[in-house]
Image (tube, rainbow, N blue to C red):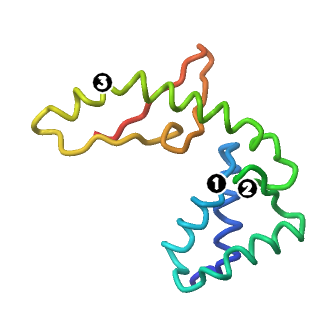
Amino acid sequence: MQLTLKELIVCHINYRDVFNAPVSKDALKSWTLTHAHANETEDFDSIVGELIEEQLIVEKDGYIAIVGKEQIIENQPQKVKITEELLAKGRSFIKLFSKISFIRYVGVSGSGAAENPTINSKDHVDLDLFV
């Protein structure tokens, strides 16, 4: 069973909500249209508009979240800044890994890849890598 575009949009927004993260409208559009509904490009904006009118989601500053969770959009600029700082700190380590001949791929994953870093109880943020 294939989900409708509207169902897919709602599912993705709710998935991001599990991690207290908004989704950028551009990323949501790209992801949903790439994965299932490439021929429904024109419908995307109207469906997002419907969901806003139905007061199920809110859009602000290019991000979308569930109504009542507007704070996660407000927090996003700080999370993006933390992510950029984390990647800058890890860049030399990542470059070192990428120069090892038997390593074929080094990629950022987890909360850093989603621009949603989580600060642990020791006030640290980890950088998850696929190697």
| Secondary element at tag 2 | strand
Q: Residues within 10 Å of mark 1 (few under 14, many from 20)?
A: some
**Residue drawn at (80%, 71%), measured in percent from left and top?**
49
Q: Residue 47 occupies which quadrant of the picture?
A: bottom right
| Secondary element at tag 1 | strand
Q: Amino acid at mark 3?
A: Phe
Q: Which residue is the extreme one toward the top?
A: 122
Please tell me the numbered disc located at residue 96.
none
Asked if labels 2 and 1 touch by Cβ distance under 8 angstroms, the answer is yes
Q: Amino acid at mark 2?
A: Ile
**Residue drawn at (23%, 30%), measured in percent from left and top?**
97
Marks 3 and 2, the one that precedes in the sequence? 2
Q: Amino acid at mark 1?
A: Ser
Q: Give x and y (percent) for residue 66.
A: 79, 55
Marks 1 and 2, the one that precedes in the sequence? 1
Q: Nearer the viewer, residue 117 or 84?
A: 84
Please tell me the numbered disc located at residue 64.
2
Q: Nearer the viewer, residue 76 or 2?
A: 76
Q: Which residue is mark 1?
A: 24
Q: Is residue 44 above or below residue 109?
A: below
Q: Is residue 62 above or below residue 33?
A: above
